[in-house]
Amino acid sequence: MNEDQVKGVGEKVKGKINEGVGKMTDDPAQEAKGDAQQVAGEARKEVGDAKEDLKDAADRADDTPTSAP
């Protein structure tokens, strides 16, 4: 798990909390902030997922034996 994945999940959690607080306090602005944080968190997590996939693919390519001519 890389930094973007961790921070993305953290941002999603903060967003869920803000959304819940907004609903409980009947504060649409807080609720909207939470929704936006969740979207941003998911986007950052997906960037991290893509980076991780690229890293894994590069690692597999490095491990693939090459045939000598």
Image: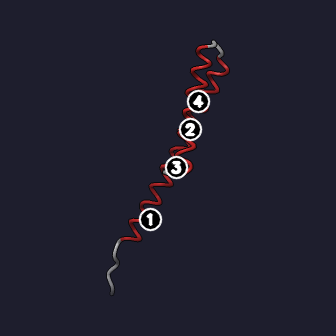
Local packing at callout 1 (Cα closer than 10 Å; few below 14, some 14-19, many 20+) is few
2 or 3: tag closer to the N-terminus:
2
- Under mark 2, the amino acid is Gly
Q: For the residues marked 3 and 4, what is the alpha-carbon distance in whole angstroms?
A: 18 Å
Identified by mark 4, the residue type is Gly
Residue labelled with disc 2: 10
**Nearest the camera: 54 or 17?**
17
Q: Where does label 4 land, which residue?
A: 15
* Mark 4 in CB contact with mark 2 (< 8 angstroms): no
Q: Secondary structure at mark 1?
A: helix
- Please provide percent x and percent y for residue 33: 64, 27
Compare marks 4 and 1 and give the one earlier in the sequence. Answer: 4
Is residue 63 shown above or below 68? above
Q: Mark 4, residues whose alpha carbon is within 10 Å: few (<14), some, or many (≥20)?
A: many
- Of callouts 1 and 2, which one flags the residue occurring earlier in the amino acid sequence? 2
Q: Secondary structure at mark 4?
A: helix
> Whole-percent x and y of residue 63?
37, 70
Query: Which label lies toward us, 1 or 2?
Result: 2
Residue type at the position of mark 3: Gly
Please state which of the two labelled residues, at mark 2 or mark 3, is closer to the viewer: 2
Q: Which-is-in-front pick, marks 4 and 2?
A: 2
Confirm or deny contact between disc 4 and disc 1 (CB under 8 A): no
Determine the image quadrant of residue 25. top right
Query: What amino acid type is highlighted by mark number 1?
Result: Ala
